Image: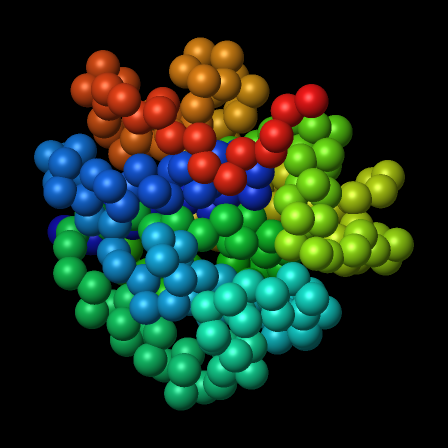
């Protein structure tokens, strides 16, 4: 029987930090009850960034260096190691050796993959598994406002380059969800790609956390208290 793997890929500013903390908190609780495991990560607590580093094109990592330098410096993980062949081999081996027939991983950076070869590298990490993706999307204008706020909190300056991760002007690719979702559909099949509206989650539950657990087969009635997570939220007003 093939291993089941669910990837929560973001996007950013859709309650990802809350989802990741809830998954970690429920390792021995709700997840265990339905046979899912949320693996520990050797790089960044509760965020499987090694999957992103192993799949993103090296030139794109370098082009996004201001963002990644902050994140990688925070976790003391030099960017130059990310696509070293030995490191990639070790990452593949570590993923393959992870115990569990049902696994859930979370890293919002996978929502930023833009090329088929990047998606293929993710899929290759889980060769032979039944792979599905959960992606939360947010109304573009509001997303860009929240996203820009979060980047400025990190001390980053917005870019005028439309190809940049830090570009939030007209036609910003970071809100072209459909194009990026289509890459996943092509790679793993449309039925295995689940797009969830952030706004609908907030209207019905006040949080995206319950919807993530529902995607893992956990009935919302059993997920009592999961709407209490409000981490890394943008101030209102």
Report the side of 117 relative to 129 (left or right): right
Where is residue 159 shown, x and y percent of the image? 83, 55
Where residue 115 sits, quadrant-wise, is bottom right
Where residue 95 sits, quadrant-wise, is bottom left
Q: Is residue 3 above or below residue 236?
A: below
- Residue drawn at x 72%, y 37% is 144
- Residue drawn at x 20%, y 69% is 97
Report the side of 111 relative to 26 (left or right): right
**Colour pattern of the rendering:** rainbow
Closest to the observer, 2 or 213:
213
Q: Residue furthest top?
A: 204
Where is residue 147 shown, x and y percent of the image? 67, 41
- Residue drawn at x 61%, y 30% is 235
Where residue 211 sits, quadrant-wise, is top left
Q: Is residue 196 above or below residue 178?
A: above
Report the side of 87 relative to 35 (left or right): right
Where is residue 176 shown, x and y percent of the image? 70, 40
Closest to the observer, 234 or 31:
234
Closest to the observer, 2 or 8:
8
Q: Is residue 49 above or below residue 148?
A: below
Total numbered labels placed on residues in the image: 0
Q: Is residue 49 above or below residue 61?
A: above
Q: Is residue 71 visible?
A: yes
- Residue drawn at x 52%, y 58% is 119
Q: Is residue 124 visible?
A: no
Quarter of the image for the C terminus: give it.
top right
């Amino acid at each position: 029987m093939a291993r089941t793997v669910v990837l929560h890929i973001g996007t950013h500013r859709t309650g990802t930090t809350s989802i990741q903390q809830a998954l970690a908190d429920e390792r021995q609780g709700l997840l265990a009850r339905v046979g899912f495991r949320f693996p520990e990560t050797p790089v960044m607590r509760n965020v499987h960034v090694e999957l992103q580093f192993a799949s993103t094109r090296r030139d794109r990592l370098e082009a996004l260096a201001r963002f990644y330098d902050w994140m990688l410096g925070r976790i003391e993980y030099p960017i130059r190691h990310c696509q070293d062949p030995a490191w990639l081999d070790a990452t593949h081996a570590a993923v393959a050796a992870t115990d569990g027939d049902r696994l859930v991983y979370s890293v919002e950076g996978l929502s930023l993959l833009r090329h088929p070869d990047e998606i293929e590298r993710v899929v290759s990490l889980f060769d032979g598994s039944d792979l599905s993706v959960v992606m939360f999307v947010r109304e573009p204008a509001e997303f860009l406002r929240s996203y820009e706020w979060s980047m400025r909190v990190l001390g980053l300056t917005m870019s005028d380059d439309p190809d940049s991760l830090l570009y939030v002007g007209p036609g910003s690719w970071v809100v072209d969800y459909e194009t990026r979702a289509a890459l996943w559909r092509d790679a793993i099949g449309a039925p295995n790609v689940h797009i969830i509206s952030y706004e609908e989650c907030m209207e019905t539950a006040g949080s995206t956390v319950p919807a993530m657990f529902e995607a893992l087969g956990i009935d919302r009635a059993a997920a009592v208290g999961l709407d209490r997570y409000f981490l890394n939220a943008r101030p209102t007003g």
